[in-house]
Amino acid sequence: MTENKELAPEWQEQKEKREKLVVPEGMSKRAYKKLLKQEKLAAERDEFVAKRKEKRKQLRENKKRERDSTPQPSPPAKRIKQEPTRSGVKIVLDCGFDDLMTEGERTSLARQLVRCYSENRRAPFSVDLHISGFNGLLRDRFENRMHSHHLQWEDITFDETDSVDTAQPTVYLSSDSSDTLTELTPGTTYVVGGIVDKGRYKDLCKNKAEKLGIRTARLPIDQNIRLSGRRVLATNHVFELLLKWLELKDWKLAFEAVLPSRKVIPPKQPKSQATD
């Protein structure tokens, strides 16, 4: 009996609410109750959404305060492009062998010339770069297939003739020479043969240099590194080696930095002595 008396006030309150319920005209009591229930759910949903927004806002503010209170690392210093140092060395890429190459070889040479220009632009010690013998089919490729982009290049000279100015000391690099190049000297011109021929024309650059009265020299390959296959290097590799020597003043390090590993035979490792 005591339990029923305790529940009586709650039951009485619900009964009073039902009795006070005023149903709008034209609507059944059930439909009106359903409408009230939907309105209640909508109100609860709006309240839930508002609370969730407030909670997210609070989380963002907490994270912002945490970031503001945490010391942030300084942004990396903006890299300043350094202008290369002029080495005082002049390098001529002699491309006067247009008629001795196939179309594919001329295409390869064109790519190598682009590489040479790019390497000289970013080298710490740049050279005075000239391209001689720039005519015929090679020039046609630059002007048509490559859309004359070379006309926008800077710090480079294109010469249609394949003659070499010998007003200053000049050395024509040739793998067939009996002399070895030991260093690069400011005020000297070094000529590199611009040809891709897979070794078909032996003594080609050497003979041309002798006709022009220019002394020849070969790179100090044997003294610093062992090559696999042919000892003739690509035009761009020779050019990059000269740039790297100007930077490092060390032929061995220059060869190791420039030549692809597939062309280099690694040094033999000393046999370890057996222990008893």
Image (cartoon, grey):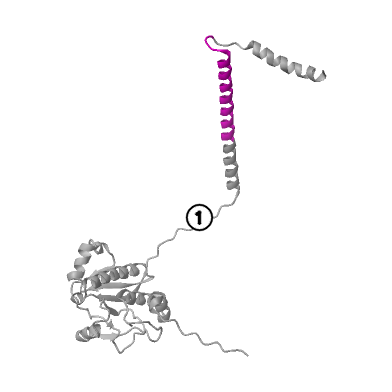
- The one of 164 and 135 positioned closer to us in this rendering: 135
- The residue where tag 1 is placed is 75
Q: Is residue 160 left or right of residue 41?
A: left
Residue furthest top in the image: 25
Q: Split into 4 quadrants, where in the image is the N terminus?
A: top right
- Disc 1 secondary structure class: loop
Secondary structure mostly seen in the magenta stretch: helix
* Quadrant housing residue 133: bottom left
Report x, y in % for residue 72: 56, 52
Q: Reply yes or no: does residue 48 show up in magenta.
A: yes
Q: With respect to residue 70, does 131 lie above or below?
A: below
Q: Reply yes or no: does residue 112 show up in magenta.
A: no
Report x, y in % for residue 192: 28, 78
* Quadrant housing residue 117: bottom left
Report x, y in % for residue 101: 21, 75
Report x, y in % for residue 268: 47, 85
Q: Is residue 37 left or right of residue 240?
A: right
The residue depicted at 25 percent of the width and 69 percent of the height is 107
- The one of 27 and 145 positioned closer to us in this rendering: 27
Q: Give the range drawn in magenta.
A: 25-54
